[in-house]
Image: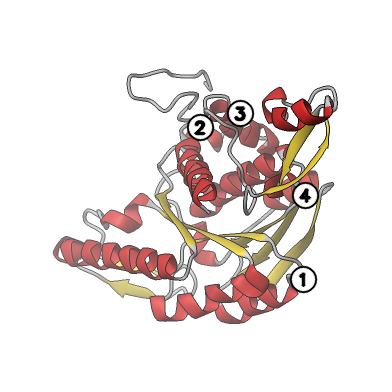
Amino acid sequence: MLRPKEAQGQIPGQRFIDPEVLTRIDNLELVARSVVDGFISGLHQSPMLGMSVDFAEHRSYMPGDDVRRIDWRVFARTDRLYVKEFEADTNANLHLVLDISKSMDFGSAAPTKLEYAKFLAASLAYVSKRQRDRIGLITFDSNIVEVIPPSIRHFNEVLHALDRLEAGGASEYHEPLQRIGESLRRRSLVVLISDLYAPVEELLPAINQLRHRGNDLIVFHLLDPLELSLELGDVTSVEDLESGSRMPIAAAQLQQEYRQLVQAHQAELERRFGANQIDYIFTDTSRPLDSVLYRYLSDRERQNRTR
């Protein structure tokens, strides 16, 4: 079921695991390993999740170190083997900030947005574990729900928390994100995963608070395919998951205008986040997770080389 599938033009090493398949795997760590290990071996260089790859210092070579990192110029001068340490090799803090509001519980097919967010968060935690980074998790709806402080020993605790997550109440961004931003005592890599159901003018100042103390911020924007297309057939009303209120609609007449509004929202988020040096990754929940992760890690690696 998880057998690699090679095809012309496919990204080397990718498995293209169907999100629907992932929902049938009853082990979040296995999901993360399957997604991440499926493509990392195909990259030309190991992707760096850390905030930068600036040179930091030398240290003595130890058996098992990657020989490609030996500084041969230093060896020529000293006749001793040293490897280069980079900033991303030092233990960084990864804060996974996950929106668990009721709207995240929607899915027109498997998986729901919340399930997809769990898979994504688990995969990012697994990459971070491979790099010996400190991993933490914060969940929120209109309030902060759970906090696991970052630690190199918290990988399994984060997975257990993700596994038992359930959708909460109404969404609210400003107050919980402000409290989260103020609580981050050390410069960190912060990953926000949400469906971003709020006007851009509300979202940007709220999310900007996570950049407190110079944090490196990445936003994953998740939507269900039905939320992009509004292909509802003969449906005549829809229900707001967070308020429970119902609204009559004429879906066929609204489709074109609705799609334009969704596309405009995405484009404005991408533009505004980019202007504020916030990485923005959009995906719908039908996309294979490893392809999303590959795009993200490749972008990060390319940006780190130019910083």
Q: Earlier in the sequence, mark 1 or mark 2?
A: 2
Instruction: Tell me if I can see residue 99 in this picture.
Output: no
Residue 56: x and y in percent read 73, 49
User: Which residue is situated farthest in the left direction here?
Assistant: 253
Closer-to-camera residue (57/228): 57
- Confirm or deny contact between disc 3 and disc 2 (CB under 8 A): no
Looking at the picture, the colour scheme in use is secondary structure
Q: Mark 1, mark 2: which one is toward the viewer? A: 1
Closest to the camera, between mark 2 and mark 4, is 4
Horizontally, residue 124 falls left or right of residue 76, namely left
Q: Secondary structure at mark 1?
A: loop
Marks 3, 2: nearer the viewer: 3
Q: Tell me the distance, in whole angstroms, between the alpha carbons under discs 1 and 2.
A: 39 Å
Residue matched to label 2: 21
Precedes in sequence: disc 4 or disc 3: 3
Q: CA distance from mark 4 to mark 3?
A: 21 Å
Q: Which residue is denoted by mark 3 in the rendering?
A: 37
Q: Residues within 10 Å of mark 2 (few under 14, many from 20)?
A: some
